[in-house]
Image (cartoon, rainbow, N blue to C red):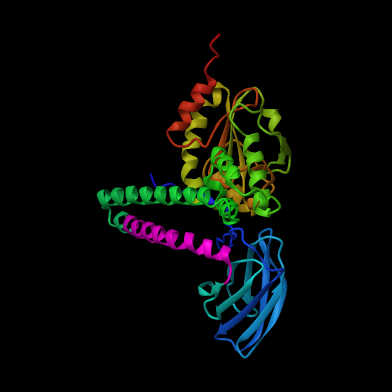
């Protein structure tokens, strides 16, 4: 079926790190701007979820120059003060030539960065896949709106097939480009789609000269996080406040088969999946099964309203920090709905169960152990 999840979206444009080559001691960006003869160009870097200005240059007669140095190629962003949008590109120690379009910054271009060239190779193929996916999605919507279930199903199948081809292309590209920082960068921009085994394979092909890159550091951290929540491992302990502000600890549910359910009131796919969780809870709650909802909401009133509207009559906790939720980060959750099923001893049985698969897994977990 057409997979629907609420993803952790990072605003950065996907950029790739350069293949190893002899670099000069710093970079120089010689830029031309179409649509702005004066003003300021701002050079930014990513700082958590935000962009932070690290340099600027005056625009004179539609031109600007930026100089500096980087240890390794990395993603940077340029904006024009007072204009909306930004242009992301891989910067490296070389002579770069940039053309910015003041009224359409994302369409800007840069040359002279071998890393950026790797990125654009990937992006050109990715774009063709995305266009096909968009076409099938539009067909699906049109067929659904007119009640044409046959055409809707066909479009849905095509959508899923093309998405799978895109995912395969992305993995293949990453594994074949381990000598470029693009590989770990692209991996972390799409980390939600890679399982532990995928990440371990990628880690093995990434050039060791990139070990100090934030993308590689994040890759290794992600591997460590997923290793900690593998089936058979004790679920990481946490304490978080419920809707009344009372601290609730995971360990307080030992003795029950527990579903840790990550969701949010603003997440459409989560709300669509909630009836399945409600049905499972009603079916098994008197047999030793319970649910602990962990919300990635930021608005307490909307969180509580959704709990009541969807009939989620179990314990709910949240720190109201959205994607910065402490528990979701602890468990490596980068897409919702997501869940972990725990046995009575607090060990992880499995993760990511939904729909018709949920009751069967719960029943199996509740079954008496065979001696």
Q: Which residues are magenta?
A: 112-141
In the displayed structure, would residue 67 be above or below residue 284? below
The stretch drawn in magenta includes residue 208:
no
The quadrant holding residue 92 is bottom right
* Among the 4 quarters of the image, the one containing residue 89: bottom right
Q: Residue 364 at x, y = what percent?
A: 50, 22
Q: Residue at x 71, y 41 (%)?
A: 240
| Dominant SS type (magenta) | helix
Q: Which residue is found at the position 58% from the left and 77% from the top?
A: 98
Where's the N terminus, which quadrant?
Answer: top left
Which residue of the protein is positioned furthest toward the bottom in this rendering? Answer: 61
Tell whether 47 sits left or right of 36: right
Q: Residue furthest front?
A: 22
- Residue under the image location 66 percent in, 52 percent down: 210
Q: Position of residue 192 (x, y in %)?
A: 55, 47
Q: Eyeballing the image, is 189 above or below 68? A: above
Visible in this render: residue 3? Answer: yes
User: Is residue 113 shown in magenta?
Assistant: yes
View extreme (top): residue: 371
State the count of labels.
Answer: 0
Quadrant into which the C terminus falls: top right
The reply to whether residue 321 is in sight is: no
Residue 110: percent from left, percent from top? 56, 73
> Quick check: 55 above or below 184?
below
109 relative to 176, above or below: below
Quarter where residue 43 is shown: bottom right
**In-front residue for pair 366/60:** 60
For this rendering, which residue is in front, 211 or 40?
211
Q: Percent from the top left, x then y, of residue 71? A: 71, 61
């Amino acid at each position: 079926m057409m997979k629907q999840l609420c993803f952790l979206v990072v605003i950065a444009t996907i950029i790739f790190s350069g293949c190893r080559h002899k670099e000069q001691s710093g970079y120089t960006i010689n830029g031309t701007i179409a649509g702005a003869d004066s003003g300021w160009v701002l050079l930014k870097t990513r700082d958590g979820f935000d962009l932070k200005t690290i340099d600027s240059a005056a625009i004179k007669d539609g031109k600007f120059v930026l100089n500096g140095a980087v240890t390794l190629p990395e993603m940077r962003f340029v904006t024009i003060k007072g204009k909306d949008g930004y242009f992301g590109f891989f910067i490296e120690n070389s002579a770069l030539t940039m053309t910015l379009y003041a009224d359409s910054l994302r369409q800007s271009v840069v040359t002279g960065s071998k890393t950026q060239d790797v990125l654009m190779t990937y992006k050109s193929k990715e774009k063709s896949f995305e266009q096909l996916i968009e076409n099938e999605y539009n067909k699906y919507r049109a067929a659904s709106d007119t009640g044409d279930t046959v055409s809707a199903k066909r479009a849905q199948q095509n959508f899923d097939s093309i998405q799978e081809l895109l995912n395969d292309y992305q993995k293949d590209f990453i594994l074949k480009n381990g000598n470029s920082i693009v590989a770990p960068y692209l991996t972390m921009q799409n980390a939600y789609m890679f399982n532990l085994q995928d990440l371990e394979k990628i880690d093995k092909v990434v050039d060791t000269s990139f070990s100090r890159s934030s993308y590689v550091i994040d890759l290794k951290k992600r591997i460590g996080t997923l290793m900690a929540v593998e089936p058979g491992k004790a679920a990481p302990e946490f304490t978080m406040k419920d809707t009344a502000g009372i601290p609730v600890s995971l360990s307080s549910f030992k003795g029950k088969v527990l579903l840790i359910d990550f969701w949010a009131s603003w997440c459409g796919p989560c709300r669509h999946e909630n009836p399945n969780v409600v049905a499972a809870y009603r079916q098994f709650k008197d047999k030793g099964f319970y649910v602990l909802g962990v919300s990635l909401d930021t608005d307490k009133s909307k969180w509580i309203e959704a709990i009541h509207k969807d009939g989620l009559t179990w314990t709910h906790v949240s720190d109201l920090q959205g994607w910065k939720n402490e528990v979701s980060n602890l468990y490596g959750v980068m897409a919702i709905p997501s869940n972990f099923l725990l046995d009575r001893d607090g060990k992880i049985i499995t993760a990511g169960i939904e729909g018709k698969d949920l009751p069967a897994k719960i029943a199996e977990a509740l079954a008496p152990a065979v001696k």
